[in-house]
Image: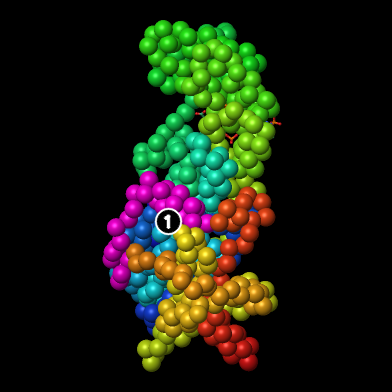
């Protein structure tokens, strides 16, 4: 993954040049990264991408070659866009901001800051685009994966998406995020090496097609790779293919190996899997599993389960790594407060005709309330002012709806320090630990919030006193 600070939009650099010129570059600011709408009409999302964010921030330094490239960029009059003095200043920059983040694998909801960046305005601004790129995509895919894995009800889900992913880096990031959401393994060998994700695979139709007969193809595969025998059975006739797998499986067993399973990749997967199961069981292979693939997603998996499909491993490619019908999460990065010349924090707000787009002001934190092991509600509050007791949260866009947090709830604050003054202060979890966190988190959500369609809305909103200060700021900005 690139760690170049040029992984940004040009306007970040032109604004940076402007901040430098007008003496605001070092002014302290706080930005929050959040999304406004859950993807896939899901009841929750899974935070992901922080691991790559940390690597990118650790490498945040402009190299001589990068500065030389910037020096070649023309303004609209053809003269250099950037002052030499500004480029020299960029050359001295090292990451000095505080970063607080919601740990990867945490369930998150609209308007909750997944990242909070506090430090020199110019640095926080220059990080915006790369942070959005990494968090938006991985949060989208981790959420998709969590939905698919919940639909699979604990059965293995293999991520097969590399060939259909959004480019090579997108594919590796997608494999990482899919693993966080609950996938057991990936077919992407580079993601295996880069992130330590288990790699798995079967074989393609080309293997079968390159032989005269299917039987010959399975025999040759069993000879060459006797410890990796999952035969793709649908090249010519699926159930005939299963019978061939059984025949070859018996010869394999005689050599001291075992037929691991078969893969179905077309046709009616419910009916075929039931028939294939019968053939495998009657043939003496009750432990051979049935893998299914073919443009699967969470809804198809749920439907196949309702139909009684005898599938126990799910291969999911395109829909997993692209997000399918929703190819992007619309996360944004907004200024929450800026320190004025008197040294006080000034809350900032972005107005909009559209209530959902009016940003929350202040230095925000997210407090999650838990009762009897269940997540009961999240309050976005201003850390400078705290939460007023009893805690009341307002619906993000409909202030007529609010919820008072039940007495006796315990709570935890979700944003945790990752960088202090530019230094990494957190011990980063391993990918299996992040996956485990995701699995644990989901057990604390009520089943109705996890429903694939029309889920119950989890109460996540703005704490009352922050809401009131927000209304005052709106009034002030309008007048
Ligand atoms: N029992 C089922 N219930 C619901 N959807 C199914 C069922 N069986 C398969 N599907 C899905 O229906 C779609 C069928 O895909 P498609 O129309 O491409 O046919 P196909 O079986 O793949 O044919 P081929 O690959 O030979 O062209 C796939 O997304 C598949 O996962
Ligand atoms: O359907 P997806 O969820 O995207 O899963 C990946 C797909 O990629 C392969 O098909 P492809 O036709 O590319 O190659 P094959 O010959 O191995 O089937 C595989 O058989 C799956 O159908
Ligand atoms: O190993 C497999 O079965 C596989 C790998 C990539 C894409 N589809 C299937």
Q: Quadrant of residue 243?
A: top right
Ligand 1 lies in quarter: top right
190 or 236, which is in the foreground? 236
- Report if residue 439 is visible in the image: yes
> Disc 1 designates what residue?
104
Quadrant housing the C terminus: bottom right
Query: Dividing the picture into quarters, in which one does residue 397 lie?
Result: bottom right
Q: Position of residue 200 (x, y in %)?
A: 44, 31
Q: Is residue 169 visible?
A: no
Dividing the picture into quadrants, the one containing residue 414 is bottom left
Q: Is mark 1 within 8 Å of ligand 2?
A: no
Magenta residue span: 419-445
Residue 61 drawn in magenta = no
Coloration of the structure image: rainbow
Q: Residue at x 50, y 40 (%)?
A: 154
Classify mark 1: residues with Cα within 10 Å, few (<14), some (14-19) or many (20+): many
């Amino acid at each position: 993954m690139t760690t170049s600070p040029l992984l940004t939009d040009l306007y970040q650099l032109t604004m940076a040049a402007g901040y430098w010129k007008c003496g605001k570059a070092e002014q302290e600011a706080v930005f929050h990264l959040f999304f406004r709408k859950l993807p896939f009409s899901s009841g929750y999302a899974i935070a992901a991408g922080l691991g790559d964010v940390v690597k990118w921030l650790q490498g945040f330094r402009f190299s001589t070659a990068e500065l030389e490239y910037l020096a070649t960029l023309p303004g609209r009059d053809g003269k250099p866009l950037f002052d030499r003095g500004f480029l020299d200043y960029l050359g001295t920059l090292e990451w000095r901001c505080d970063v607080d983040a919601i740990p990867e694998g945490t369930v998150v909801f609209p308007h909750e800051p997944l990242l909070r960046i506090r430090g020199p305005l110019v640095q926080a601004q220059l990080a915006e685009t790369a942070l959005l790129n990494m968090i938006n995509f991985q949060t989208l895919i981790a959420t998709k994966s969590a939905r698919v894995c919940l639909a699979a009800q604990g059965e293995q889900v293999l991520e097969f998406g590399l060939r259909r992913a959004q480019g090579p880096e997108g594919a590796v990031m997608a494999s990482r995020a899919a693993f966080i959401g609950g996938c057991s393994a990936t077919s992407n060998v580079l993601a295996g090496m880069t992130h330590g994700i288990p790699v798995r695979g079967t074989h393609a139709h080309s293997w079968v097609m390159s032989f005269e007969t299917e039987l010959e193809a399975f025999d040759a595969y069993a000879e060459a790779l006797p410890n990796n025998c999952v035969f793709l059975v649908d090249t010519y006739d699926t159930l005939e293919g299963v019978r061939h797998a059984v025949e070859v499986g018996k010869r394999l067993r005689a050599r001291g190996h075992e037929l691991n399973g078969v893969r179905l990749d077309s046709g009616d997967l419910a009916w075929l899997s039931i028939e294939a199961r019968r053939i495998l069981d009657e043939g003496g292979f009750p432990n051979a599993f049935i893998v299914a693939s073919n443009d699967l997603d969470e809804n198809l998996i749920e439907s196949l389960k309702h139909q009684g499909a005898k599938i126990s491993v799910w291969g999911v490619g395109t829909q997993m790594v692209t997000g399918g019908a929703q190819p992007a999460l619309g996360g944004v990065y907004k200024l929450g407060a800026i320190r004025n010349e008197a040294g006080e924090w000034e809350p900032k707000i972005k107005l909009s005709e559209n209530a959902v787009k009016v940003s929350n002001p202040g230095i925000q934190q997210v407090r999650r309330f838990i009762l009897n092991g269940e997540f009961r509600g999240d309050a976005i509050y201003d850390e400078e002012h705290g939460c007023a007791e009893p805690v009341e949260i307002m619906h993000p866009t409909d202030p007529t709806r609010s919820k008072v947090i039940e007495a006796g709830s315990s709570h935890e604050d979700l944003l945790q320090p990752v960088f202090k003054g530019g230094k990494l202060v957190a011990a980063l979890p391993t990918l299996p630990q992040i996956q485990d966190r995701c699995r644990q988190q989901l057990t604390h959500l009520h089943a109705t919030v996890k429903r694939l369609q029309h889920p119950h809305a989890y109460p996540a909103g703005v704490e009352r006193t922050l809401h009131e200060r927000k209304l005052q700021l709106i009034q002030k900005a309008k007048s």
